[in-house]
Amino acid sequence: NAGVTQTPKFQVLKTGQSMTLQCAQDMNHNSMYWYRQDPGMGLRLIYYSASEGTTDKGEVPNGYNVSRLNKREFSLRLESAAPSQTSVYFCASSDVGLNSPLHFGNGTRLTVT
Amino acid sequence: GEDVEQSLFLSVREGDSSVINCTYTDSSSTYLYWYKQEPGAGLQLLTYIFSNMDMKQDQRLTVLLNKKDKHLSLRIADTQTGDSAIYFCAEMGPGGYNKLIFGAGTRLAVHP
């Protein structure tokens, strides 16, 4: 049982390049999320998908797009990377219900030069 | 808006108790959470407390909730070196769907 799998683990981009971060979960969860983690700022929600076929903006969506490809997969795309997007990106999933915990992947460390 | 605040560092001696504190702003939060992050890994749920509770105990962990002061604490008894990690406090954001609002995290260092 892999849980939440993110690829790649590390990535270096030049300013203006594009890339897609992949996330897949095998827990049959309805909801999936993308967070970014920056030093001293905790985790901030970029986008979330409450269920297959829906996506919504979180706290910091600018510069990102997402696709809920199916129930298992939720990808995050940077169309034109900027140094301010240097961060660690975490994908998470959860079941429906207020006390259903978030299950996190191990993160993607992205550096934009 | 919603905000969750924590102190950034805590250093304790092995065997002592650790207390990590957190303040939050949204009094309507139904659940409050503690997550643990070990180096190079994602966050793992440690424990949570429902807003109608004052205290929750789970083995070495004790969570205290003071709703009047919007203060949450996590006590780890008999702290071990394996407890060294970053601990995040989180509250449920508006609109449900488990959109959590996280604090900046408290780095716990346990020394012999």
Image (cartoon, helix red, strand yellow):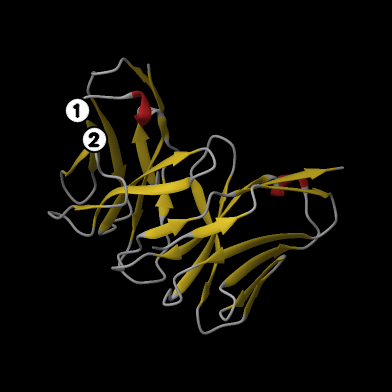
Disc on res. A79: 1
Whether residue A86 sits left or right of residue A72 in the image: it is right
- Seen in the picture, residue B27 relative to B34 is either above or below; the reply is below
The residue sitting at 28% across, 35% down in the picture is A22
Query: Residue A26: where, in percent of width, then height?
Result: 31, 49
Q: Compute the Cα span from label 2 to label 1.
A: 7 Å
Q: Position of residue A81 (x, y in %)?
A: 27, 24
Which type of secondary structure does the marked residue at label 2 adopt?
loop
Residue B54, given in percent of the width and then of the height, sits at 61, 82
Q: Residue at x 77, y 63 (%)?
A: B77
Q: Position of residue B11 (x, y in %)?
A: 78, 47
Mark 1 surroundings: few (<14), some (14-19) or many (≥20) residues within 10 A? some
Q: Amino acid at mark 1?
A: Glu
Question: In the picture, which quadrant includes the C terminus of chain A?
Answer: top left
Asked if B41 appears above or below B78 in the picture, the reply is above
In the rendered view, tell whether residue B69 sits above or below residue A7: below
Residue furthest to the left in view is: A53
- Which residue is painted at 23% across and 59% down in the image? A50
